[in-house]
Image (tube, rainbow, N blue to C red):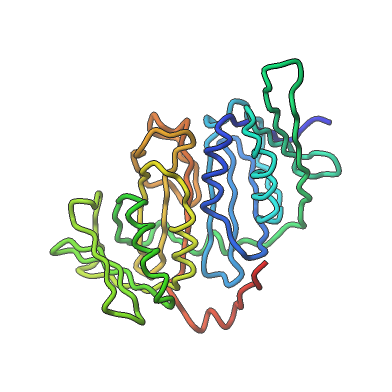
Amino acid sequence: MTAEASATIASVKGLVVALQAVRTTLKLPCAVTFDPAGLKLRYLDGAHAMQSGISLSASVFSQFHAPTPLTIFVPLSVLLESIATVASSMPQELHFQYPGPDSTLLLTTTEDTRGRTCICSYAKVATLAAQDMSALDEMWDPQDECSQAILSGLLLREAIEDFEWTGGEVEFVMRRNPTRFSLQSIKQQSLEISFPAHVLDGFSCHEEEVRASYKYKHLKAAFTNVAQKEPWSTKVCISSRGVLKVTHMLTLAGGGLVPMEAPALLGTFTSQGSAQRTCVVQFVIMAHDEAAEQAFPEDEPA
């Protein structure tokens, strides 16, 4: 069978680490797009309050074939578990192919035993009917004014973890003069974490002061699941409508802090010399809105 789209990646361990950043307990459909520019994975949460995605440029792969854009839909949890399982033996490469047998997404790995035999593992991920994810393109307006800052993703992860015991909502505060970026619990206002100006890069504020609150569970999903051990850059943007966009720049195979730019929403990172080992992970989170939450009840946990 000739594959309409296929890709092979050698940084298997790094890919698994990157994918952990978008894991969730909800049963969600995931859009997997093979595009001439690279591979994209994205999902929309049940309450239409958060979207997430991973983007890998074609240069990340040792082999990449996608003459025309091709999008398929698979269960997110099944896809992540399948990749983690077939990659558990630390193979040399991970290969994606669509369509596989029975129109599935086929994942295969080959473990080099440096002997007379090799071990091959595979998983077939059944596809879903086409899903309506139009809201993915409506949540963030690239023309909208926004406030932003770039800082260590590790610092942000540790800060968000400190809010776990309070639950509820966390308010983001950005102030122009003096430069200030802080997080504060709505329930426990005595808990506030401020980041000193010297750790902020590319700071800008579209108003004198910007404030917006987000549900802790969405912030936890966006910041605390990143398992990369090396430092990484994270860009935080808040639009004039209070929409939060979080962009993590993760390395697939070590190398430390990656220079940060401002890629398009869930777009492909292709600039900078480090692009060949870089994965873009993005989250877009709506400001907390009780009316919207009632209109779009969330999925039940898996």
- Quadrant in which the C terminus appears: bottom right
- Give the residue displayed 36% in from the left and 51% down from the top: 154
Number of numbered markers: 0
Q: Position of residue 83 (x, y in %)?
A: 66, 43
Quadrant of the image occupied by residue 113: top right
Q: Tell me if 197 is positioned left or right of 93 in this view.
A: left
Q: Position of residue 188 (x, y in %)?
A: 32, 80
- Quadrant in which the N terminus appears: top right
> Most extreme residue toward the top, as rendered?
116
Q: Position of residue 229 (x, y in %)?
A: 42, 44
- Camera-side residue of 280 and 190: 190
Q: Is residue 233 above or below residue 11?
A: below
- Give the residue displayed 61% in from the left and 69% down from the top: 46
Q: Tell me if 205 is positioned left or right of 88 in this view.
A: left
- Camera-side residue of 45 and 261: 45
> Most extreme residue toward the right, as rendered?
102
Q: Position of residue 281 (x, y in %)?
A: 48, 49
Q: Tell me if 50 is positioned left or right of 69 in this view.
A: left
Q: Is residue 93 above or below residue 107?
A: above
Quadrant of the image occupied by residue 98: top right
Q: Is residue 147 above or below residue 65?
A: below
- Give the residue displayed 80% in from the left and 30% down from the top: 2
